[in-house]
Amino acid sequence: MSLIGKEIQPFAASAYHAGSGDFIEVSEQNMKGQWSVVCFYPADFTFVCPTELEDLQKQYATLKSLGVEVYSVSTDTHFTHKAWHDHSDAISTLQYVMIGDPSQRISRSFDVLDEEAGLAQRGTFIVDPDGIVQAAEINADGIGRDASTLVGKIKAAQYVRNNPGEVCPAKWEEGSATLKPSLDLVGKI
Amino acid sequence: MSLIGKEIQPFAASAYHAGSGDFIEVSEQNMKGQWSVVCFYPADFTFVCPTELEDLQKQYATLKSLGVEVYSVSTDTHFTHKAWHDHSDAISTLQYVMIGDPSQRISRSFDVLDEEAGLAQRGTFIVDPDGIVQAAEINADGIGRDASTLVGKIKAAQYVRNNPGEVCPAKWEEGSATLKPSLDLVGKI
Amino acid sequence: MSLIGKEIQPFAASAYHAGSGDFIEVSEQNMKGQWSVVCFYPADFTFVCPTELEDLQKQYATLKSLGVEVYSVSTDTHFTHKAWHDHSDAISTLQYVMIGDPSQRISRSFDVLDEEAGLAQRGTFIVDPDGIVQAAEINADGIGRDASTLVGKIKAAQYVRNNPGEVCPAKWEEGSATLKPSLDLVGKI
Amino acid sequence: MSLIGKEIQPFAASAYHAGSGDFIEVSEQNMKGQWSVVCFYPADFTFVCPTELEDLQKQYATLKSLGVEVYSVSTDTHFTHKAWHDHSDAISTLQYVMIGDPSQRISRSFDVLDEEAGLAQRGTFIVDPDGIVQAAEINADGIGRDASTLVGKIKAAQYVRNNPGEVCPAKWEEGSATLKPSLDLVGKI
Amino acid sequence: MSLIGKEIQPFAASAYHAGSGDFIEVSEQNMKGQWSVVCFYPADFTFVCPTELEDLQKQYATLKSLGVEVYSVSTDTHFTHKAWHDHSDAISTLQYVMIGDPSQRISRSFDVLDEEAGLAQRGTFIVDPDGIVQAAEINADGIGRDASTLVGKIKAAQYVRNNPGEVCPAKWEEGSATLKPSLDLVGKI
Amino acid sequence: MSLIGKEIQPFAASAYHAGSGDFIEVSEQNMKGQWSVVCFYPADFTFVCPTELEDLQKQYATLKSLGVEVYSVSTDTHFTHKAWHDHSDAISTLQYVMIGDPSQRISRSFDVLDEEAGLAQRGTFIVDPDGIVQAAEINADGIGRDASTLVGKIKAAQYVRNNPGEVCPAKWEEGSATLKPSLDLVGKI
Amino acid sequence: MSLIGKEIQPFAASAYHAGSGDFIEVSEQNMKGQWSVVCFYPADFTFVCPTELEDLQKQYATLKSLGVEVYSVSTDTHFTHKAWHDHSDAISTLQYVMIGDPSQRISRSFDVLDEEAGLAQRGTFIVDPDGIVQAAEINADGIGRDASTLVGKIKAAQYVRNNPGEVCPAKWEEGSATLKPSLDLVGKI
Amino acid sequence: MSLIGKEIQPFAASAYHAGSGDFIEVSEQNMKGQWSVVCFYPADFTFVCPTELEDLQKQYATLKSLGVEVYSVSTDTHFTHKAWHDHSDAISTLQYVMIGDPSQRISRSFDVLDEEAGLAQRGTFIVDPDGIVQAAEINADGIGRDASTLVGKIKAAQYVRNNPGEVCPAKWEEGSATLKPSLDLVGKI
Amino acid sequence: MSLIGKEIQPFAASAYHAGSGDFIEVSEQNMKGQWSVVCFYPADFTFVCPTELEDLQKQYATLKSLGVEVYSVSTDTHFTHKAWHDHSDAISTLQYVMIGDPSQRISRSFDVLDEEAGLAQRGTFIVDPDGIVQAAEINADGIGRDASTLVGKIKAAQYVRNNPGEVCPAKWEEGSATLKPSLDLVGKI
Amino acid sequence: MSLIGKEIQPFAASAYHAGSGDFIEVSEQNMKGQWSVVCFYPADFTFVCPTELEDLQKQYATLKSLGVEVYSVSTDTHFTHKAWHDHSDAISTLQYVMIGDPSQRISRSFDVLDEEAGLAQRGTFIVDPDGIVQAAEINADGIGRDASTLVGKIKAAQYVRNNPGEVCPAKWEEGSATLKPSLDLVGKI
């Protein structure tokens, strides 16, 4: 079974909080009590990664307004994260938390560690306030992600969490109709 | 490590080919030599599933034009798939291949089998002509997928496959600029 | 040793109660405190199965009058059971409980799961009010069962349960003579 | 999985051929090349057993005419079988092969050995000319079997063997209609 | 080490008490508090066995007068023992306890079970009131035992038990001299 | 299963040939090609033992005339055997082979080694010319054996070996009638 | 035993060749056929590390003149190495090879990986042209190394390699006397 | 991971205290509560060793003034250490503690035991007052160490211990500037 | 490590006390609280053994006067020991304790059991009053021991036990000088 | 079983040949083809040891004349052996081979290594030209050996080797009578 529906595992790591310019300590506890987006990428100072992280930053305000915190993770150190933030035009725009995972523990526990390379795969995870993974998306190297799709998924997940007994159909958008699973619906859609 | 970058495992299954109305035998060989989208869902005659499968059908023509075959998979039998196709308005529109996986082998090998329930999780996989998984997306129950995002990912994956040495940045769209990873780009994005 | 004389194992499953048209939860506790017939078959929407289930329905009134509840089981879901009941002439006549066993646990615990196919074999079991299996009959695919033979067996089993110290000879019918095993009978029959 | 669809295991045993009054050696090879009924029972010189064996004898001519050989098996020796045949009115009518299984190997391989008691359970098996078990029926102690139901099952099994692609519905009788599984029949019965 | 000097193992079995014509339950407890002769043989309704059992019967009165109970054991059932007693001239004379050991447990615990055949070897054991085996004699098939030798052995065993510190020389007969092992006797006999 | 019917295990030992007054080497090969009596006892220079060995000597001529060689065995050395023969009145009459078994291997392979004491139990074995044990008799300490019973057993064993298809009833004596096991005898004795 | 005297293990890694400004592939083969200094440090963009690496650069010309190549190693990627070289005053002076070890394999094989942190300890190793480690020096965090001591050690190691049978005493400097171990020297120094 | 940062393991050994000319008992407790230098070498009465030990003695006064005790260790006995001290010009100057390690336990626990030869490698360790190894240096045979480098390392280690939050750069000398790791320094050196 | 310095293991055995002519029970407790000589030999009634045991007897008075008890041990029984004592000129002179070890346990625990032969090797052990082995001497077969050397060793062992801190040099005789190990003696002898 | 009668194990070691003043390599091959005395002792520069080694030297000429080579062994190095030889009055007289066993392999293979101390126990072994141990003598610390007893043992061992079929009685001296084991001698000594 995939990680969907499972609780995230404990971890402790140092991070660069891009918004405040501080080094902070982060654990799995920070990812509970709120919604989280956890975005893994292979390495600082590479090519697809900054465009993805910048794209994610563009959704940051929206995500914050939905009560979502954003964490990027690579197996680089928090020192390197700060240096990248200092020197890259794209990365300097980031305001969220950049976690350093040189011990590879977080990447391994989200099942995105390429053991051969020692680098994380391009996986994005939506974690609910109970620390349960609600959605996952992983792309091969060379294929960038589109952060805008996260917003819709989170709205659907939040709607389902707040409205037990209803489900969101495909392509559901906030405000449109949901479905109430019932005996009468069986085979009727 | 996730399934990304790994080859799909061998399987043999019966399927209902919705387009031709025939029962056919399918194996992992059918998923090689072309691009494939493999879409898992929990069960026939349920609620979110038909909207997702219908939504996927709406992309079918576009996907076919890109050389992509589509397979839906649940742990129901091919008999049940045909019956669903016969009786459901939404499902009757489908034209792609509906694989029956009552032995649970395919769902388990794609790591989306909920062993407790005996049902597949909502996972979508893009498989390249070598049988290598290029992208994966899995949602918790109750959150529908948006099939339209598949087209962009496949175009990016095809571009990268056809243009070794280039990578697609975040939110890349067909025709827009790609990146050529090089020493000079390090830290410059 | 076969299952005869052994207690049924715990399970929990969703079922379609054809008589009331409801989805219900069923466990091994439902099969205690009364007599039960448990009838496994390979798959909904197939060929021999509906004739067997319909044949079993024809004995349902008689079985109920003997204090027997009837459960059919396949590895299909309860959703599919309802759909089949909605659409099949033969199945629409059913009034007993149709258990969904997609997790394959019940079929495996009654030793009738074809692991290769993920489908149940055609086994019928008579369970007494203590949850002890009293009779079993299993046929290969393609050979239909005859539900009428169940009535006689259940009457014999009930007679033996109610009259400790007596046994029913071959072909025994209700009201005819039974045997009281005793020293004098040894070698005398 | 039950024994249905599996090949019988090798064995070698002494038997009393009631018809000829001889002691003979029997192996699993004797059960191939023809159809066989194998009827297990707990013990010679007991109560239900002779009525069952006598009942089976009454079907013997019919079974022979269908090309079926009959074997009864208990964990008694062939010596005891002969003595029982010599002294019991019911048993003296038997003409088929009475296998002695004091080593308990045959009973164990058909999964009907009560290891605690060292006696066989009341199981009847239909074996096809390839040595594959086609049907099984097992009753608890005290409940006699009805040999007449064997004839119908064997006719159905022979019909299916001789007419690949057809299946016999429930309660099928020789000469009545069978079913040809096809796509069109799905959900139509 | 052989069984000599070891305690018999627990068992529970049904037996035919030839003397009273009853079926009785027997356990290892019956073999304690008195002296016992336990006589194993291969099978009822065979050849050497009845002559041995009849020969043992001829010593029964003498053995009883010495406080010895006699048990015969084969892997046949107690039902078969009764039938044999009913029909055999030789066996009909028996008055002692004929234990049925179809579960093979007693034969195995006395180390006389021929596992290949499922039959007991021809072993006779003398058990003292503490359940300790004092003497054993086992013959190959085809060689009958002579029960009269048991009486002398039991007398010697009883003498030694009642007179600690004395031993019976070879061929000792009741009333003749015994030996008191002492330093002076070393090398003097 | 006891040793009856099994082949003796290989061994090599030094022995004192009492008849010739020589030390000789003995192996299991010496016990093949002729009949053998192997008589174990606890220890030289003790009490019951010399009376038993002397008693056995008294049968030696008869046994030789039947083609039987006699071997006594204890865990003493062959040196001690000679010394005992030199100094004991009873033992000085012996003419057969006295095997020394200080390595305890022969006693252990005949299952009569008391591991705690390092001494052999009082077991006597009849071995046929193929090295197969045909009869065994073991007594507790303090109970002497009677060698005269050996002659009868050997005659019976030799008769059965020479007359395949016949068996000796209990208390059989040379020249008296034997039994030919046949179908007609079943239950007739 | 420490790594001294052992051959370095195989590896493959990407590196930033600071001198040429190129990304290159490096393996253990590059460390054979010449002398090598391998200098591990915890992380790019930290504090003690750049002073150590700069200090090592100051010895680079001397080391090159002795036929020694220099490799720095951390668990950062070669991308980060280049970025550090681009942006740090101290690091921009480097001309040797900066190996990226994100898979942690090289650090682990030199026994300097802090598994908890995922970072290398401050270890420096001298490797001879056969790939054998000749000297090692490791400091705790916070204590800088002095690269100048490497030159003397390498000269001593090269002298010993070129002059078999001679050894360098403590504090040996090029040109000063060495020792020829001989019997006469035992206990004379 | 190397020994750096790990606590030394317990040991108990006899030693020759060169300064006082006494035999003393030493354990790992003696290496706590003060700074220690532990200097391993292969064997007494050899060649490089005395020059190294003498060189170390020349630093002894300085090291003592820094609160450091010095221990030399080889797998020779303390008897041999005394004899060497008595007879060697170089060794007779020593005043520190010469530990005998014939049981090889200390050498093995510091990972410098050449198991093949049974001799220690040339390793020097700096241990802090908590028994934690702060620095290690190991050379191949034939290459002498330079004890003067120890003083600088110890001063740096003591400075870092006494000034939490500061680190010593490469080539740091007492009194010169240290570094205070801080966010602002990242990438600025 | 050899047995020297180890405590003897528990045992219980029968022995012939040659001095008193009694059979006695002996255990390891008898070998504590006094000095003991334990003399193993292969077998009674053999060749070298009696000369060795007689030679040991000649030292018996001297040994007794030193507070030493003497035990001879072979794998013969105590019965055989008595017989040997009765009949052998050499052995009849013995007065010490002759232990019978037919269970081989004592010989095995002193590591002198030839497992192949089941006989003890020619080992002599000196055991102190704490049950600790102080000296051992073992010879191959065919080479006799000289008991007179025992006296000197025991005197030395007793001297060392009574005078802690002194040791006996080679060839030490009672009354001659011993050595007090001290620092000053190192290398001075 | 002790080492007596077993072949010595392979080894390779450096030694100081006291006679020639050379360092030599020694292996188990040197101990074959001639007789050897191997004398273990705890440590050079100690107390009992030199008196024992000097005592052994006094027998050296006699031993050489018997074709015996002498080897002393301790876990000290050959360097220390030479130093001891240089500085000790007693040791400077030695002319035989002093083996260094710092790897402890030889001491362990002769079962005299005190693993706790890392030192050899005081064991002396006589090895014959086939490398078979013929005699062993081991003393506790503090008790010196007497080398003069070696000569007698070696003469006896050589006599037995040269005169198969004869054995030396206790206290045998060259030229005195030996024993020829024969049947007639049993119990006659």
Image (spheres, coloured by chain):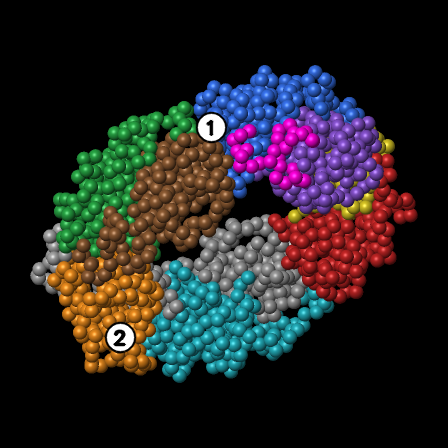
Chain colours: A blue, B purple, C yellow, D red, F cyan, G brown, H green, J orange
Tag 1: residue type?
Answer: Ala
Quadrant location, the N terminus of chain B: top right
Q: Which residues are magenta?
A: B160-189
The answer to if A9 sits in the magenta stretch is no
The answer to if B174 sits in the magenta stretch is yes
Give the residue displayed 64% in from the left and 75% down from the top.
F164
Q: Do pointers 2 and 1 mark residues of a single chain?
A: no
User: On residue C57, which mark appears?
Assistant: none
**Residue toward you, J167 or A188:** A188
- Residue J13 located left or right of residue H59: right
- Give me the C-alpha separation between circle 2 and circle 1: 84 Å
Q: Is residue C19 above or below residue G121?
A: above
Residue F35's spot in the image, x, y percent? Answer: 52, 77
- Residue J82 located left or right of residue B56: left
> Circle 1 sits on which residue?
A83
Which secondary structure, mark 1?
Answer: helix
Give the residue displayed 79% in from the left and 43% down from the top.
B24
> Circle 2 sits on which residue?
J157
Label 2 is found on which chain of the structure?
J
Q: Determine the image quadrant of residue C164.
A: top right
